Amino acid sequence: MNRNWLYILSLTPGLVAIYGNLTGGIFALGNFVFSLGFLAVSEWITKDFLSNDASDQDDFIPKFILLLHIPFQLMSVASLFYGIYTHVLTDYFVVGAALSTALNSGTSAIIVSHEYIHRKVKYERMLGKLLLFSAGNLYFYIDHLKVHHKWVGTNKDHATARFGESLYAFFVRSVSGQFWGALKIEAQRLKTQNKMTYGLENYVIRQLVLQALLLFLVYYFIGMIAVGAWLIQCLFANFLLEYVNYIQHYGLSRNENQRVTEEHSWQSDKFVSRFVLVDLSRHADHHYYASKPYHTLKTYHNSPVLPTGYAGLFFIAAVPKLWFSMMHKKINEMNLSTN
């Protein structure tokens, strides 16, 4: 079997979320339980999947799967609104559906957009921006490309978690730093072009205006409950983004004049993280060679390795004492340089 077909598993959270939004009741929590329950447990009991044979590196299948994520993500969000509009989703199940939808946005929107915004083809970058909009993200497109990849592992990068910093402290610092940083970067870009620095040509301002317009339309046609569900979806989806940033670089540091190498990011070869998250977990190679398509990323024997995959670490990272106990021991054992 061509290994690349395994990436089709990345569509399963979307299927579960859509089904839950259209069915309602306890099924509205379906993707929350599936992603942070079943997949999380699977990370701890499955072995690493190290295969990355060159013979499997054709482009059609990986590109096709990425494209499928776009309608799946849009249907996931649309089904959330539809479920509320038709009263299939009611009471606390609306919150469950919003969280389940957000978990899909964390994969089908943000992770897939991460792949697209690194592409050089204009329409692929546009698809990345569309996906980020569907998750309510305002800053990632600018900060990730212009700051994170340049300054990862240094104090100039808001998205690098510092040694001893909790997930929650990191979330506040990272989001605020990236947002204001992206806003200023866009203003500086427009200033050099003699354009209005904080007008609609500023990406961050434009995203804010479009999000406000969407909220107005949702309120007008569906109601305040749908607005609340959208805001919960956006908040949790972006919390998941920052959770990923948190575990990918936690505690690792480098000199500002030192080239980014495979030693400055945590990696994981767990089956779920590889194929449900389209090889995002091979993050060390991504920073070493940022332009490489996801299905060609490699594992390195000298890269720091996470205790398990991304899904499996979520509730560990959510409890700072557990996270520090596990990760600080690993950092000390590997004699890693920390910030």
Image (spheres, helix red, strand yellow):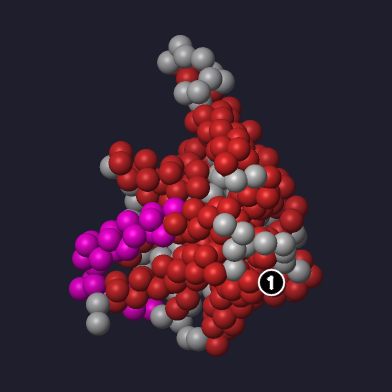
Magenta-drawn stretch contains 69: yes
Q: Residue at x 72, y 47 (%)?
A: 172
Q: Is residue 44 above or below residue 65?
A: below
Task: Name the residue at the top extreme.
Answer: 194
Any part of residue 266 in sight: no
178 magenta-colored: no
Q: Report x, y in % for residue 20.
A: 55, 69
Could you say which quadrant of the image residue 176 lies in? top right
Query: Please, what secondary structure does the residue beneath circle 1 have?
Result: helix
Give the residues in magenta. 50-74
Q: Main secondary structure of the magenta part?
A: helix
Image x and y of residue 271, in percent = 45, 78
- Most distant residue in the front direction: 86
Residue nearest the observer in this picture, 168 or 229: 229
Seen as rendered, the residue at the extreme right is 321
Task: Residue under label 1, please give it.
Answer: 315
